[in-house]
Structure formats: structure tokens, C-alpha cells
Image: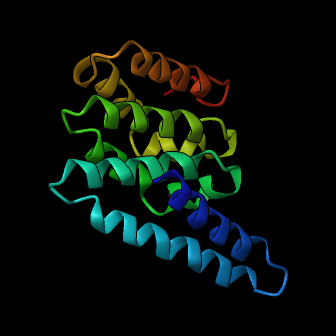
Amino acid sequence: LNSNLDVIFTKLDSKIDNKIESKSNSLNTLDNLLVVLYTIIKSEDNLTRELVATILCNMSFRPTYRQRMVDSGVIDKLSLLSGTTSETIQELCAKCICNLTCSIEIHSAMIKYNIIQIILMISLVRSVGIHTKQLCGKALLNLITNDNIEY
């Protein structure tokens, strides 16, 4: 499983970093991947949903992907994914959110997409895991800046 994810990300990175391809083609590759992931999120199979959450979590670790992810609606998809009873998926959603909140430039967009409510829902209602709750706390702390204090 991890080797397959490594192959996917290696290929995606090579497309994005490749100087021959234009910037718009690279973004289309990322956008196409996100469309596929967003489509299979609706699966009733928990393993499939866990794999999607894992891929989104791994993608959110890369600062160059974060803006596109937020622009493409990842916040709504994380809200949908976090509606499961699986603690593993809850934790992956919290990790993804925590990673996304590391990019200050997308804070206002994330707040407009109700990221604070999603964080609170995961940490206070849905999750029972200490580590998941800690990740939610870190995400909230990441969002506390002078620009965001009014929210």
C-alpha cells in the first residue's frame, strides 16, 4: 500500500516539477487526481474511504499542493470523510487539516469553508482518540493569527 502511494506521489511530483510541461498542465494533473479522489469518497467501503483520507493527508503535507486542495473543495470533502465512525479516518482527517493549517496564506479561505466548525466537530463530538484531539488542537492553534482573531 505505501509503495503504491509512493509511486503515485513520485509520478505526480515528476509531472509538477518537470520543466518541460507547462504550469497549467501540472495543475490539471493535480486537479484530475483530486476529482478522482472526491468521486470515490462517497464509497460505502471504509477501506476505500481510509485510503482516500490517507492520500489527502499525504498530499496536504506538501506545501505546493495545499492551495489547490483548498480551492478544489477539500474542506467539504474532509467534513464528509470525518462523518464516519472510524477513528483511523478521523485521525487522518485531523492530520490533513493540521497540515493544511500550516500554510498561513490559505487560512482565510479555510475559515470561509468552515474549517473551525469541522475541527470542533471532530475533536469534541466524533473522535475519542487523544492523538486525534491533539491534532485538532494544533490545527486550531495554527489558525490563531492576528488576521484571523476576529473569526
The residue that appears at 58% across and 38% down in the rendered structure is 99
The quadrant in which residue 94 appears is top left
Above or below, 150 relative to 12: above
Furthest-left residue in view?
Answer: 44
Q: Is residue 84 left or right of residue 119?
A: left
How many numbered circles does the render carry? 0
Q: Residue furthest top?
A: 130
Task: Give how far across and how far down residue 2 sits, in percent.
Answer: 52, 51
Give the image location of residue 16, x and y in percent. Answer: 72, 72
Q: Is residue 81 left or right of residue 137?
A: left
Q: Residue at x 18, y 33 (%)?
A: 85
Horizontal side, residue 22 vs residue 102: left or right: right
Instruction: Depth check: give the residue in front, 71 or 42.
Output: 42
Q: Residue at x 40, y 22 (%)?
A: 132
- Name the residue rendered at 22%, 39% in the picture: 83
Residue 124 or 20: which is nearer the viewer? 20
How far across and how far down the image is residue 126, in percent?
23, 25
Q: What's the coloring here?
A: rainbow
